[in-house]
Image (tube, rainbow, N blue to C red):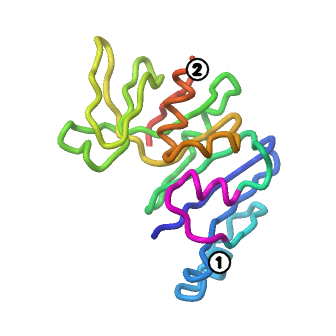
Amino acid sequence: QKTAYEIASGDWSSDVCSSDLFPSHDKRFNVEERFKSFNFGIPYTIKQIEKTDNPIETVDAWLAEDKIENVIFCDCDHSVDIKNIIDNIDLNYESIIMGHDITVEDVSSWSVATVVNGYVTNILEKQVPQLKDGEEIKGVIGCYYFNTYSKDNKKFKFFSDVIKDLIKKHKQVKVVPC
């Protein structure tokens, strides 16, 4: 089981970094002390949670409020530079995701977004989407910015489901390079 690291901010002037931490991981790998050694240079909190079955349950266990604004969730098991997300934050975007070039052969390992002019038109889990004229596909790296993230999203299983719901509601979802 991997843990997700989230970076959250209310107004981007007081960043908060937080990690969900399973008690068994902390005992086995000394995660809390290792996390503290990263020296982020921003205030952060560490919260122990019980094991969850999917990323949305993890966020729901971590999130104390009904909603949070200007938040980035990273659900990946490798290091990711989120500078392109931070550099593109604009309150006109409901969400920003990180995408990379992908071939149809690579689809089984990634969430896949269809993109037109830098905006996501659809997103699927490990499936090749039906492409329309002018669309391209991008592999989604697993870091997601949300202008507003609500506990109402707990009805979903994956962040891609949240993104798909935003698109259905005609909200702008931007894709930036990794």
Q: Is residue 55 magenta?
A: yes
- Whether 13 is drawn above or below 168: the answer is below
Is 117 magenta? The answer is: no
Mark 2 is on which residue type? Lys
Viewer-side residue, 51 vs 25: 51
**Quadrant including the N terminus:** bottom left
User: Does dot 2 land on a helix, a strand or a loop?
Assistant: loop
Residue at the image point whose x is 43% and y is 18% from the top: 117
Furthest residue toward bottom? 27
Kind of residue at disc 1: Ser
Query: Could you tell me which residue is drawn at 75 percent across and 56 percent down?
Result: 16
Span highlighted in magenta in the image? 49-62
Q: How many numbered badges does the structure rendering display?
A: 2
Q: In the picture, residue 121 is in which quadrant? A: top left
Q: Residue furthest top?
A: 133
Mark nearest the camera among 1 and 2 is 2
Give the label on residue 37, or none.
1
> According to the image, label 2 marks what residue?
169
Earlier-in-chain disc, 1 versus 2: 1
Kindly check if marks 1 and 2 are in contact, taking CB atoms under 8 A apart as contact: no
Quarter where residue 49 is shown = bottom right
Pinpoint residue 76: horizontal percent, then vertical percent: 46, 57
Q: Residues within 10 Å of mark 2 (few under 14, many from 20)?
A: few
- The answer to whether 76 appears left or right of 41 in the picture is left
Instruction: Return the x and y of residue 141 as percentages of the image width and height.
Output: 42, 47
- Under tag 1, what secondary structure? loop
Left or right placement of residue 41 versus residue 99 in this view: right
Q: Nearer the viewer, residue 75 or 1?
A: 1
Place of residue 59 in the rendered image (x, y in percent of width and height, measured from the top left): 63, 54
Measured as percent of width and height from the top left, residue 46 is found at 71, 70
